[in-house]
């Protein structure tokens, strides 16, 4: 049985797909195993859409968020994987290391607290 949250996620996705900034979520994923059966990690690029914003000083101060961190919101339906704190987001020509991820109750948006970092691609 579908809930109103499912409908909300579908509505948000339909309304915003193609209207946000192009982004890439870089996931550090296991891509194989070495001769000792230890996992080998590689960065894989996952296209998505999102927006980058900043925290207002009061919110950042109360939550202990550093002033140079950004809030990056990703449209969940545009991303094939679930973002986590090991990932990096590329948006508007910059790379951002994820420090914290939240999702709304309808799972329409991933909200990521991020700090500037370097290009993870090989």
Image (cartoon, rainbow, N blue to C red):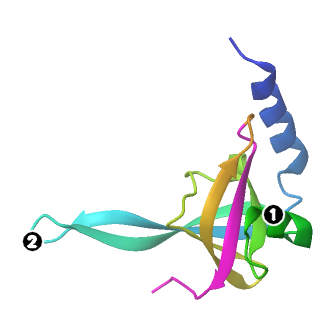
Q: Is residue 94 above or below residue 53?
A: below
Residues rendered magenta in the picture: 107-122
Is residue 51 rendered to the left or right of residue 36?
right
Numbered disc 2: secondary structure: loop
Res 56 quadrant in image: bottom right
Q: Which residue is mark 2?
A: 35
Residue 114 visible in the picture:
yes
Answer left or right for 30 relative to 109.
left
Please identify the quarter of the rendering in which residue 117 is found.
bottom right
Residue 113: mark in rendering: none
Q: Could you say whether the residue bearing mark 1 is in a helix, strand or loop?
A: helix
Q: Position of residue 72 (x, y in %)?
A: 76, 65
Tell me the crowding category of disc 2: few under 14, some 14 to 19, or many 20 or more residues within 10 angstroms, Cα based: few
Residue drawn at 83 percent across, 31 percent down: 8
Nearer to the camera, 115 or 122: 115
- In this view, the mark in front (2 or 1): 1
Extreme residue toward the top, this view: 1
Relative depth, front residue between 99 and 74: 99
Rendered view: 101 above or below 122: above
Q: Could you tell me if the residues under marks 2 and 1 are in contact, i.e. CB atoms within 8 Å? A: no
Is 119 situated left or right of 78 in this image? left
Instruction: Residue under label 1, please give it.
Output: 62
Q: What residue lies at 12% left-to-right and 64% top-to-bottom?
A: 37
Q: Percent x, y for residue 80? A: 58, 51
Classify residue 42 by image quadrant.
bottom left
- Per the model, the C-alpha gap separating discs 2 and 1 is 49 Å
Taking the image as shown, residue 11 lies to the left or right of residue 47, namely right
Q: Please state, as top left, top right, bottom left or bottom right, where the C terminus lies in the image.
A: bottom left
Q: Residue furthest left?
A: 36
Q: Which is nearer the N-term, disc 2 or disc 1?
A: 2
């Amino acid at each position: 049985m579908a809930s109103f949250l499912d409908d909300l996620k579908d509505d948000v996705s339909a309304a915003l797909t193609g209207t946000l900034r192009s982004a890439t979520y870089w996931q550090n994923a296991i891509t194989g195993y070495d001769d000792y059966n230890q996992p080998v990690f590689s960065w894989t690029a996952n296209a998505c859409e999102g927006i980058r914003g900043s925290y207002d000083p009061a919110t950042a101060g109360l939550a202990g968020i550093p002033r140079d961190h950004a809030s990056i919101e990703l449209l969940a339906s545009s991303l094939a994987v679930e973002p986590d704190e090991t990932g990096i987001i590329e948006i508007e020509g910059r790379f951002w290391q994820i420090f914290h991820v939240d999702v709304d109750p309808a799972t329409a948006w991933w909200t990521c607290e991020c700090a500037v970092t370097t290009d993870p691609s090989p």
